[in-house]
Amino acid sequence: MVGIDPETGAEVSLFNPRQHLWSEHFVWTKDGVRILGVTPIGRATCQRLDVNDEARPAPFIQTSRQIWIKMGLHPPQTDPRLDV
């Protein structure tokens, strides 16, 4: 499966958990609500799969993540986060 890197416009393969390490391609925003792609693969995957549910009027997944954060269930402690 392929997607378009929104930063470069290049067609790239999407993230494959059997071949790639999550922490090399993605980072959580400081508040833990959104996933950001930090490589062409990560950016294309975020956009193509709409991992932050931004294509819909009400971003259900971001609301869910906020609830999980309040419950102490999210994001995984081992996942990278932005410092700013």
Image (spheres, grey):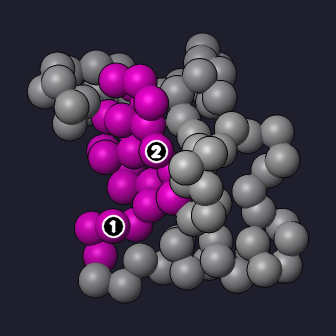
Q: Nearer the viewer, residue 59 or 32?
A: 32
Sequence-wise first label, 1 or 2: 2
Asked if the stretch drawn in magenta spans residue 48, the answer is yes
Q: Position of residue 17 (x, y in %)?
A: 62, 27
In magenta, the rendered stretch is: 34-56
Asked if the stretch drawn in magenta spans residue 45, the answer is yes
Q: Quadrant of residue 42?
A: top left
Q: Is residue 61 positioned above or below 63 on the image?
A: above
Helix, strand or loop under label 2? strand
Q: Residue at x 33, y 67 (%)?
A: 54
Q: Residue at x 84, y 67 (%)?
A: 73
Q: Position of residue 57 (x, y in %)?
A: 28, 83
Q: Amino acid at mark 2?
A: Leu
The quadrant of the image that shows the N terminus is top left
Q: In the visual, does 69 lie left or right of 10?
A: right
Q: Is residue 21 positioned above or below 59 on the image?
A: above
Q: Position of residue 31 (x, y in %)?
A: 62, 64
Residue under label 2, please give it: 36
Q: Is residue 63 positioned above or below 74 on the image?
A: below
